Image: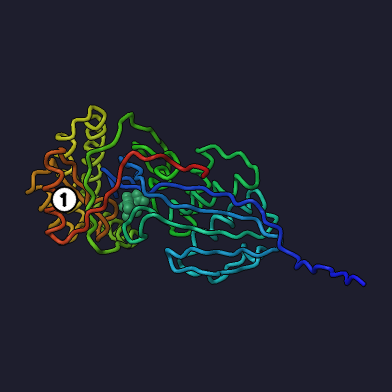
Amino acid sequence: MVERRIAVVEPKEPEFRRFKVSAPGKLMLFGEHAVVYGRPCLITAVDQRMEVSVQPKPNDLIEIGAPGVGITGFKMELDRLNESVETPAGARFLIASLRNFSKKFGLSSGLKIETKSEFSSEFGFGSSSAVTVGILKALAEFSEIKLDDRQLFDLSYQTVRDVQGVGSGFDLAAAIFGGTIYFVTGGKEINSLDIGELPLVVGYSGIKADTSILVRQVADFRQQNFAEAEAVFDQMTFLTQEARRFLEKRDWEKAGQLMDTNQNLLELLGVSTRKLSVLIESARKAGAYGAKLSGAGGGDCMITLVSEEKRGEVEKAIGDAGGKVLKVKTNARGVKIE
Ligand code: PMV
């Protein structure tokens, strides 16, 4: 007699499609801090990207894996999104994005969310804004909701404001639109510059800056020295507009000189550090066109415009002065579906 065997197949979770999106990091070229007070700034997207993937799940759980910021296996119920539950710091932007998206468009299933970054969150390249833009774009894609870049900016900006209360939104514009951008507070103007790659060298100071603290520090300075702070911001406005002109003409030498002026103004605001100043000075001495800190100050990176002949010497000088040269390309592409 032939024995009939019945194969027992374990029920498998259905595999749903994964929606993968990537968004670039950014660097501030001119006008930081002034842009918090209604002034313009110039920014560029860098070719190091943050990848965010979203996979629907047949349950009502949000699962988050973001190893770059120490989050593995975080889970919460979908219907608790609107409660003010304790969330780990590394997941705050993701959860605020999910909350805002679900309020506006609804979310009907559980989700597995994973992030993977090509750059360290220590550099000040804007990992939080790239994550916010990435998750919102991925959610729109999987929910089949058409969000144009402006709507994506507005929803991302609202999310970042919900989490940190302050910020001009410049980093979101870089993550969404990419390229090199003239930007005014809150996205009042977002104009892409028609230029290619910038001859930039980026030096990391080794210290992670806390942007919110520095923004508050400048707010205090402005409160106590209103006329002086406003004068600094007005000079930054003029300088940023001039820098835009020179960048568009690819006059790196003139744009570099304006970096030096911008750095002096940032020093007046008290946001540079000794380490940043040492790296900036070393780049200038090695023949750079000009150099400044990039972003809030207090640490993170400095940037410098160089001629191709001087690039090697400037990079070496920054390294010798204790900085870490980060090899990035500028003017990178904005958010995209992978
Ligand atoms: O520290 P970063 O790279 O996020 O740059 C902050 C720039 C500020 O102008 C100080 C703040 C802002 O939101 O524009």
In-image side of 214 versus 273 (left or right): right
- Looking at the rendering, which quadrant does residue 10 occupy? bottom right
In-image side of 303 versus 138 (left or right): left
Name the residue: 20% across, 57% down: 272
What kind of element bears circle 1?
helix
In-image side of 1 versus 57 (left or right): right
| Residue in front for this viewpoint, 275 or 316 | 316
Residue 127 position, x and y percent, is: 40, 55
Name the residue: 55% across, 69% down: 74
Residue 35 position, x and y percent, is: 33, 45
Q: What amino acid is found at the position of numbered circle 1 in the picture?
A: Glu
| Local crowd size for mark 1, using a 10 Å CA cut-off: few (<14), some (14–19), many (≥20) | many
To which residue does mark 1 refer?
A: 315
| Residue furthest out toward the right | 1
| Residue furthest out toward the left | 285
In-image side of 117 versus 60 (left or right): left
Residue 19 position, x and y percent, is: 58, 49
